[in-house]
Amino acid sequence: MRIRDFREDDTPEINLIPLIDVVLCLIIFFVVTTTFDARSVLKLQLPQADGQPAEAQSKALSVLINAEGRYFIDDREALRTDVESLKQTLVDVAGNDRNRPVLLRADGRTQHQAVVTALDALAQLGFSKVSIATAPPATPSQASAK
């Protein structure tokens, strides 16, 4: 008597579901842990000045003013462009440390009033160590490259 085996032959297969799970977990991990530098988004054209570069201040409070007159304190944007809103954002970011140096970086196309407003807010809060960032003057070789 012959007993017949009705089972199908085992065919090898590759199960991709665990691989997909691992790849998706890695993608989520990298997206969550990645930090984005908001300052790299802002393209400032600094005014030019001929002078010696100052030493870098690592803990300086950065106040950025873009060409439209919007204010960015470190990585936070001031909601409005008035002095009170700017002062509130400065207090939120800097806290009570009024001895902290401040680096004011304004776009060369910014209206003068925006810079004066920032300086006024800093003075009203008691910041006394304010530096204004500038770019070195363009040399003829740099001017032709633009």
Image: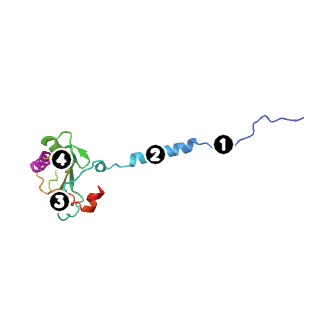
- Name the disc covering residue 110, or none: 4
Instruction: Name the secondary structure under disc 4.
Output: loop
Residue located 43% across and 48% down the image: 30
Which residue type does callout 1 highlight? Glu
For residue 27, the mark is 2
Residue type marked 2:
Ile
Kindly identify which residue carries mark 3. 49
Q: Secondary structure at mark 3?
A: loop
Residue 64's x, y, as percent?
21, 49
The Cα–Cα distance between marks 2 and 1, rounded to whole angstroms, is: 26 Å
Looking at marks 4 and 3 on the same chain, the residue that comes earlier in the sequence is marked by: 3
Q: Which residue is mark 1?
A: 13
Q: Quadrant of the C terminus?
A: bottom left
> Quick check: is 126 in the magenta stretch?
no
**Residue 101 point in image, percent of width and height:** 17, 57
> In the rendered structure, which disc, 2 or 4, sits on the residue that comes first in sequence?
2
- Mark toward the start of the polypeptide (3 vs 2): 2
Residue 141 point in image, percent of width and height: 28, 62
Colour scheme of the picture:
rainbow
Q: Residue at x 27, y 60 (%)?
A: 142
Q: Nearer the viewer, residue 103 or 136?
A: 136
Mark nearer the viewer, 2 or 4: 4
Q: Main secondary structure of the magenta part?
A: helix
Foreground mark, 3 or 1? 3
Whole-Å distance between the Cαs marked 2 and 4?
40 Å
Left or right position of 100 against 145: left
Closer to the chain start, of discs 3 and 1, is 1
